[in-house]
Image: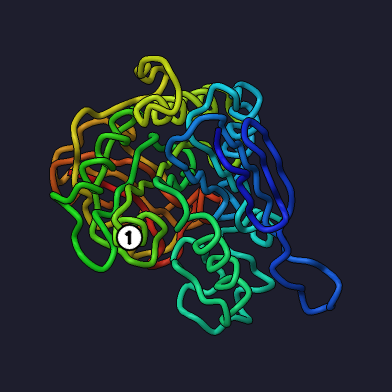
Amino acid sequence: MRDTLKIGPIEAASGAVRSGLVSIGQLADGVTEVQIPVVVLNGREDGPVVYLHAGSHGQETIYSVEMLRRLRGELDPSLLRGALIAVPLANLLAHQFATRVAPHYAAREGVAFAGDIHKLWPGDAKGSLTQRIVHFLWTNIAQRADVAIDLHAVGEPGIPFTFMYRGGKRDAEGTPQWEKTLALARAFGVTMVTTAPNPLTLAGACLDEGKPGLMIEMTKSRMQDDAIVAAALRGIRNVLIELRMLDGTVEPQRDVPIVPGVHPALPTIRAERGGLIRFEVACGAFVPAGTVVARIRDIFGTELEAIRMPADGYVMTFPPQSWVGNQAVATGDLVADIFA
């Protein structure tokens, strides 16, 4: 029988599910609490502890909240080996405005990536409010977990994919934690994309600590879609089966496009001109080098830029709608995330 698992004021005995809010500080009015919602599913038998982290960005919260609701409803803690610690909305401040970071607080912080929980790991107990949120999550959950899964979402058009940072301060390729990360990504079952090490991400910081860490990007970031929620739920269930926390067999993904294999990310394409943007290719379809992937026009309909694929590969997402919420760009904005 497992010991009671305690996260801040939330205590889950063996075989129990508990949830609650952890207070980190207050806003400038002195009375509005900044809190983190936490759900703990503590199994009856020993096994790994998995951290399901979601909601770093406020426009990417809808599918993960619903997926975690369904997961909580279907999991019987008495049959779970190990424990799940889930944070469905890490950045409640950004969620209030459906923005990537909290607009009313990011300007106050004076730190790199101000307000962006995704780029502040492992946080700082004496830093800004957002750094303190990350520090609590790191010291009380991530460091106690055996595996961390960072749940994000891209807008439409796009395809679901795992985004793996290959480590943090150093490249983790070839290490046991990297091989385990690959195995868990294969079990989750969507397109697998690797990128450079980044110690400021949750996955990168975990790999530096010698534990698997991966980031999941589903689609339709600003809406609830049953097929996407089902695919995310299937993927998490597959990971728990791969870790032997649940009995069963890994179930292949369906109803989402998948590019087989492991693919390196290519540099994101940015706009050189501002205007309204039209996407010219399908995400997940092979695109030869030189193909026009998007066109930018001004408000009078004049074409200003034809953006071409720099190498043979694929578009995994067109970010304007998920980042800004509008199919228009300014000079320098992200246009397409791509992989080889």
Q: Quadrant of residue 104?
A: bottom right
Q: Is residue 216 left or right of residue 340?
A: right
Determine whether 25 is above or below 214 in the image.
below
Name the residue tied to disc 1.
Answer: 209
The disc labelled 1 sits on which kind of residue? Glu
Q: x, y percentage for residue 38?
A: 65, 48
Quarter of the image where the N terminus is located: top right
Q: Position of residue 82 (x, y in %)?
A: 49, 35
* Residue 277 can be seen, yes or no: no
Query: Can the viewer see residue 314?
Result: yes
Judged left or right of residue 97, residue 122 is left
Residue under the image location 66 percent in, 24 percent down: 73
Coloring scheme used: rainbow
Report whether 253 appears left or right of 52: left
Q: 161 or 46: which is nearer to us?
A: 46
Quadrant into which the C terminus falls: top left
Q: Residue at (60%, 74%) from the top-left corner?
A: 106
Q: Please give the name of the residue rendered at 66% of the width and 39% of the height, measured from the top-left corner.
A: 13
- The local crowd at label 1, few if under 14, some if 14 to 19, many if 20 or more residues have their Cα within 10 Å, is some
Q: Residue 165's x, y, as percent?
A: 29, 54
